[in-house]
């Protein structure tokens, strides 16, 4: 039986991702992939039990690999990648951070010192944001003064309107984080988000996001874990189906059409090599074959009326 949609419920996948980050903090402390020391505050008591005991954590990792092979590894690599990108952008002069579909993102707190002087806006559906704020209060974690929560349904509401009401400034250098979101949106919502970023008046602004590459059924066995993921999502994740995918060969022309230039693109092999250490790291295997990382910036200054 499918759950009701995420517009009425908080996101299951946001909690799963937080659970993976909490496991990584226990398994790989002091590393880029195990840096989220706050993640455990956003998971249920049953998930905390899985996190707190080593042998149970290992069972959980094996179960995850059975249903979503490469997903655990992907989330850890993704955390390290997005951390690096936002820190680099802020060091290079970005003064505004917009987190699209933030889920249980903890960067505003984890990097509070580095983000001093930056305006941070987190966007997500109200149900997930309310749950996040509830757990922050419960854990006694202070919400930084420079962080604004902006509830939105990206499939239904106007991103420019919501951001404008939240104090967004289109003139300053901005880094947009769009982590684990694009694949859950309708194409028109993806188009609208990319076009919004392309209209930034500061052309050094940066959008960091991940996506799922489109894979033909005839080729699916060539990509680690994809066939199993498809079966799992069809059976258990009807409330959060994958809606947007694009082939790697189409990405450049699509980005250009949206008014963006690709600055860097990583496939699953490059993700593993760059962000997933293997030496002396137990329980780490391959990344699911259909995930990609990409960074883009506006190609021209459109001066759109956003």
Image (cartoon, rainbow, N blue to C red):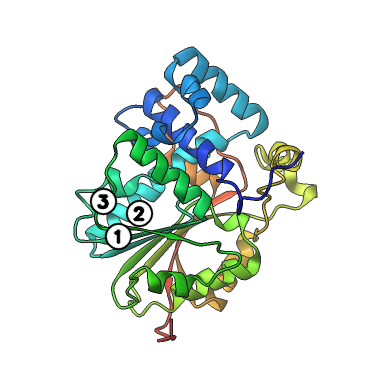
Labels 1 and 3 touching (C-beta < 8 A): no
Labels 3 and 2 touching (C-beta < 8 A): no
Q: Please tell me which residue lies in front, 92 or 182.
A: 182
Residue 192, above or below 76: below
Residue occupied by mark 2: 85
Label 3 vs label 2, nearer the camera:
3
Q: Secondary structure at mark 1?
A: helix
Counting from the top left corner in percent of width and height, residue 182 is at: 57, 58
Name the side, left or right, on which 117 lies relative to 3: left
Can residue 172 be seen here? The reply is yes
Q: Quadrant of the N terminus?
A: top right
Residue occupied by mark 1: 89
Label 1 vs label 3, nearer the camera:
3
Of the image marks 1 and 3, the number of the one nearer the N terminus: 1
Residue 74, above or below 151: above
Q: Please tell me which residue lies in front, 293 or 199.
A: 199
Rendered image quadrant of residue 245: bottom right
Counting from the top left corner in percent of width and height, residue 99 is at: 41, 57
Residue occupied by mark 3: 144
Give neighbour class at mark 3: few <14, some 14-19, many 20+ (Cα, 10 Å).
few
Alpha-carbon span between mark 3 and mark 2? 21 Å
Say which residue appears at 45% left-offset and 41% top-offset: 77
Residue 138, above or below 252: above
Alpha-carbon span between mark 1 and mark 3? 20 Å
Q: Secondary structure at mark 2?
A: helix
């Amino acid at each position: 039986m499918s759950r009701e949609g995420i517009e009425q419920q908080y996101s299951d996948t946001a909690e799963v991702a937080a659970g993976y980050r909490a496991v990584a903090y226990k398994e790989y402390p002091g590393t880029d992939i195990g840096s989220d020391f706050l993640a455990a505050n956003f998971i249920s008591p049953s998930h905390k039990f899985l996190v707190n005991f080593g042998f149970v954590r290992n069972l959980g990792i094996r179960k995850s690999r059975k249903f979503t092979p490469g997903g655990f590894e992907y989330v850890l690599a993704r955390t390290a990648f997005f951390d690096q990108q936002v820190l680099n952008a802020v060091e290079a002069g970005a003064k505004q951070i917009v987190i699209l579909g933030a889920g249980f993102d903890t960067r505003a707190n984890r990097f509070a010192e580095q983000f001093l002087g930056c305006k941070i806006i987190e966007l997500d559906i109200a149900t997930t944001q309310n749950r996040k704020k509830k757990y922050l209060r419960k854990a006694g974690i202070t919400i930084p003064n420079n962080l604004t929560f902006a509830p939105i349904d990206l499939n239904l509401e106007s991103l420019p309107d919501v951001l404008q009401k939240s104090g967004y400034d289109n003139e300053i250098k901005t880094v947009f984080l769009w982590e684990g979101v694009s694949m859950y949106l309708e194409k028109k919502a993806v188009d609208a988000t990319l076009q919004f970023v392309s209209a930034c008046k500061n052309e050094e602004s940066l959008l960091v996001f991940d996506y799922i590459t489109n894979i033909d059924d005839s080729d699916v066995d060539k990509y680690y874990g994809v066939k199993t993921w498809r079966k799992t999502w069809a059976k258990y994740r009807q409330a959060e189906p994958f809606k947007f995918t694009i082939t790697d060969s189409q990405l450049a022309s699509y980005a250009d059409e949206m008014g963006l230039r690709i600055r860097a693109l990583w496939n699953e092999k490059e993700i593993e090599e760059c962000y997933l250490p293997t030496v002396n790291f137990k329980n780490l295997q391959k990344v699911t074959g259909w995930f990609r990382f990409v960074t883009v910036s506006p190609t021209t200054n459109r001066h759109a009326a956003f």
